[in-house]
Amino acid sequence: MKKKPIQSAIETLSGVFHALNWGQPIEQDLLKILIENARKNINHKARFCLHPNPSELLQVTYLAFTKPYSDRIHKHPDKIEVVVPIYGQALHKTYDSDERIIENVKMDGSNPVALSTTFGLWHAVEILSEDFVMLEIGTGPFLSTSTIFK
């Protein structure tokens, strides 16, 4: 089955959509479209970036995940990020350098409280519900060195 396109965006990679311009109107059913795309994507993830390109200094992204999504432990050495749950439930896990869990924070779209991750903190997301959508806000530009995986 073919993935549904987002009319207000361009697909730059499989499941990665970038807005054409800052501040443009977006589809009313954006979350549903993202979840559909995540279900059809091999990595069970889809994203809609409100920033038109990866070189923007502000990065604002809707991320949709579907089971059986599996996040790798990672960190961002040069930036903080803020995530806000929008739909479904997930655990935001933080780790020490030996991959021992420091903290589990439940994120719930019915209680959209922002969570921030500091510089260099190892973390990952574990999806609890069938589908999970969050808004991620961070600084750019996005480079290959922006994320380091365990």
Image: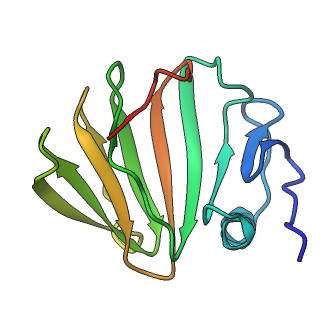
> Is 88 or 126 nearer to us in this picture?
126
The quadrant in which the N terminus is found is: bottom right
Q: Is residue 112 visible?
A: no
Q: Is residue 144 visible?
A: yes
Relative to 125, is 67 on the left or the right? right
Residue in the image at 75% along x and 45% along y? 17
Relative to 115, is 31 on the left or the right? right
| Residue 13 in the image, given as x and y percentages of width and height | 77, 43
Residue in the image at 45% along x and 31% along y? 138
| Residue 30 in the image, given as x and y percentages of width and height | 72, 62
| Residue 106 in the image, given as x and y percentages of width and height | 25, 68
In the rendered image, which quarter is residue 43 located in?
bottom right
Relative to 3, is 65 on the left or the right? left
What colour scheme governs how the chains and residues are painted in the rendered image of this protein? rainbow
Look at the picture and state if 76 lies above or below 102. Answer: above
| Residue 111 in the image, given as x and y percentages of width and height | 33, 69
